[in-house]
């Protein structure tokens, strides 16, 4: 993928975190209009549409009709859970580079808060998934799956609950500056540890928020981007893949990001040390810790030391993460946080993040996503962007 062949021109994050009176389709439409308005474009300019399993009805078939899109030449639905939307941006860039489209719209929306859905509930194994017969008896849920990874990380590397708590503390310090964040109050390590244990070793505060809402991204051809008012953010690297059980030969200490990150960095022509801002997927504190390691920001097993003592709070060190408050404090719409990671990374590159957390003179930013169960099978995607 030529890094000069696509730019992110529009972003929008729905301001609502609880939306009981909005349908899922309405939320998709709201964020689509918002991102296009941000880009200075309209629905009539869109000729490619990307969505995932959160889209209602028949996915792109239903949403294209609902939105009134008339010029679609490329449509794609990809299911990598929370990693889907980073993959969509990369696929949109590839389609633009191939001359198949010029304006691609990516949307995510959902209302799990209003519908009472959370990661604490076991997966529905009433389908014919190939893993169902092997796992339905154990009632795995995202919560206990991620807790299993946290326990293994502690066993292998001596990671502590206090170190995990620092990730929540970091997000809370950033969320206080976000007027739309679901949780705006700062927390201390002890306050995190004092919340109820929900799946050993994870406390309630180690878990992301459950929110309604959504977000959208508009990807355009660079020739078009030159004529738009928004600062140009180039897509310079993207890689996505899946990690599964491999017939029971699974290592819980790393994620699929360990495979996507090197490819994305190679494509972008940079190293982890060149990244000063990163949007790290934080469905749980252990998710963020493992992503930091797998992305190469520290050695495997050293994530706890990297996050301790608030070292990733804005202004404290060379690397800053999740300045919007992340999934742990700000927003995790549709139980899928991937698109919000892109949105905050673009804000940082544009220089429009809150002044208290804006990383100065930023050239590159990274967004990473995870979807599925970290303890069994999951997708991952790494997206690298550059301020033009």
Image: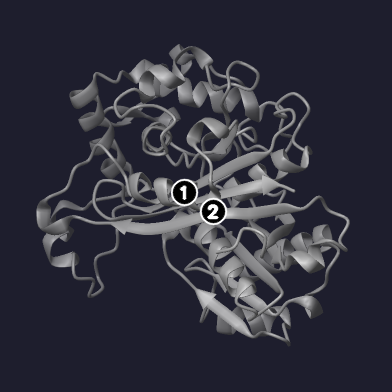
Q: Quadrant of residue 344?
A: top right
Q: Position of residue 13 (x, y in %)?
A: 69, 51
Labels 2, 1: front one: 1
Q: Is residue 216 left or right of residue 273?
A: right
Which residue appears at 84% of the width and 61% of the height?
226
Q: Is residue 373 above or below residue 290?
A: below
Q: Which residue is mark 2?
A: 237
**Residue 210 disc label:** none
Is residue 381 visible to us here?
yes
Nearest the viewer among 206 and 339 is 339
Which residue appears at 81% of the width and 61% of the height?
39
The Cα atoms of the two marked residues, 2 and 1, are separated by 8 Å
Q: Position of residue 63 (x, y in %)?
A: 62, 78
Which residue appears at 58% of the width and 71% of the height?
50
Q: Do labels 2 and 1 touch, CB within 8 Å? A: yes
Q: Which residue is mark 1?
A: 266
């Amino acid at each position: 993928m030529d890094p000069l062949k696509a730019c992110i021109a529009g972003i929008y994050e729905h301001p609502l975190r609880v939306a009981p009176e909005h349908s899922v389709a309405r939320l998709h439409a709201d964020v689509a209009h918002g991102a296009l308005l941000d880009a200075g474009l309209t629905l009539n300019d869109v000729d490619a549409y990307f969505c995932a399993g959160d889209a209602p009805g028949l996915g792109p078939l239903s949403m294209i009709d609902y939105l009134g899109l008339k010029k679609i030449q490329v449509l794609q639905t990809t299911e990598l859970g929370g990693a889907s939307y980073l993959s969509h941006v990369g696929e949109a860039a590839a389609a633009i580079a191939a001359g198949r489209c010029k304006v691609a719209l990516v949307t995510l929306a959902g209302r799990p808060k209003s519908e009472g859905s959370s990661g604490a509930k076991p997966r529905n194994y009433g389908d014919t998934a190939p893993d169902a017969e092997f796992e339905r008896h154990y009632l795995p849920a995202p919560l206990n799956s991620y807790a299993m990874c946290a326990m293994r990380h502690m066993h292998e590397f001596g990671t502590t609950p206090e170190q995990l708590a620092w990730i929540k503390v970091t997000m809370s310090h950033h969320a206080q500056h976000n007027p739309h964040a679901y949780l705006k109050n700062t927390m201390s390590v002890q306050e995190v540890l004092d919340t109820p244990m929900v799946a050993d070793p994870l406390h309630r505060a180690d878990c992301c928020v459950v929110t309604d809402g959504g977000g959208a991204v508009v990807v355009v051809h660079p020739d078009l981007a030159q004529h738009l008012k928004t600062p140009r953010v180039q897509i310079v690297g993207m890689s996505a893949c899946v990690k599964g059980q491999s017939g029971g030969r699974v290592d819980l200490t790393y994620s699929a990001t360990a495979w996507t990150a090197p490819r994305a960095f190679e494509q972008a022509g940079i190293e982890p040390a060149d990244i000063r801002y990163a949007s790290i997927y934080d469905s749980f504190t252990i998710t963020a810790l493992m992503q930091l390691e797998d992305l190469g920001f520290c050695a495997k097993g050293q994530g706890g030391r990297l996050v301790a003592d608030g070292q990733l709070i804005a202004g404290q060190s060379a690397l800053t993460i999740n300045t919007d408050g992340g999934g742990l404090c700000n927003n995790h719409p549709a139980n899928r946080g991937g698109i919000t990671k892109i949105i905050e990374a673009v804000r940082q590159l544009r220089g429009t993040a809150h002044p208290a957390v804006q990383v100065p003179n930023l050239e590159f930013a990274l967004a990473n996503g995870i979807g599925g169960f970290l303890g069994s099978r999951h997708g991952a995607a790494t997206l690298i962007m550059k301020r033009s």
